[in-house]
Image (tube, grey):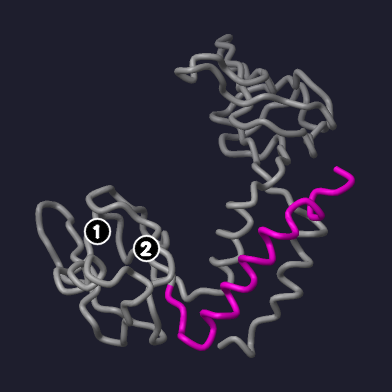
Amino acid sequence: MSSDIDFDEILGKYRMDPYAYVDICAPHTGVVNFKLDKGTAVDGVGGEWNHIPGTPLFQITRERNRRVVNAPITGIVSKIEVERDGQFVEAGEKLITIRYPLKKKEIIENILKEVLYLFVAPEKAKYFFSLDIQSRIEKKGSRAVTIRQGDEIFTMSLMKRDTPVYYTGQEGVIHSIYFKPGVSIAQGEPLVGICDEDTLPMIQKVITRVKAEWDSLYSGM
């Protein structure tokens, strides 16, 4: 597996563009009027109880009812669909893109999701590790637990019915866990990230490298 992964290319991508991009879409149909320009710095929700709304992005009017849409995150407006200003838009239409700098933890998590084998939720449901897997994790830690094809890895709880979920994928250890037991997970969202033993040392080196190079990733920003 490790021979198929170009870690330098992955790291280079984040050096060139250490940002994430969030698209803000029309919440419903209506006429849109923008309240800022491209390049404007915006603030997300703030306050101790998240009671301070973010920077106003645009107003959308439907049947004389006006609604202001605020920035959900702090960042820079990198794109505005200016041709839509004053026009009728459909629900879900992309209007603004906000760019924000990724934190070190986010970059590491993104890299891991690119190189690990992600076992995803087959349905929207609540998930729990199987009793055997949970016992092994408690005794040794998740990264000492090897998962093989056909292993019963999860119990899926849906509509008050529990169903075993069997692993399909490459053999490896549980490197990352992306769910909380008993919390509903959307279909297709990752539950765990599996790493074969040959790739594990390389991944640890890359994580160490990202941590060490973080200042250089943001130089000139």
Q: Give the overall secondary structure of the magenta segment.
A: helix
Q: Position of residue 43 (x, y in %)?
A: 67, 24
Q: Is residue 215 above or below residue 151?
A: above
Q: Position of residue 151 (x, y in %)?
A: 24, 82
Taking the image as shown, residue 200 lies to the left or right of residue 125, namely right
Residue at image position (84%, 31%) is 38
Would residue 55 be counted in the magenta stretch?
no
Q: Which residue is mark 2?
A: 191
So how many labels did they put on this image? 2
Range shown magenta = 194-221
Q: Quadrant of the N terminus?
A: bottom right
Residue at mark 2 to residue at mark 1: CA–CA distance: 8 Å
The tag on residue 192 is none
Q: Is residue 113 above or below residue 7?
A: above
Residue at image position (56%, 35%) is 91
Specify the quadrant of the image occupied by residue 131.
bottom left
Discs 2, 1 touching: Cβ within 8 Å: yes
Give the residue at the far right of this rendering.
Answer: 220
Q: Residues within 10 Å of mark 2 (few under 14, many from 20)?
A: many
Q: Secondary structure at mark 1?
A: strand
Taking the image as shown, residue 131 lies to the left or right of residue 96, namely left
Q: Quadrant of the C terminus?
A: top right
Q: Position of residue 128 (x, y in %)?
A: 22, 60
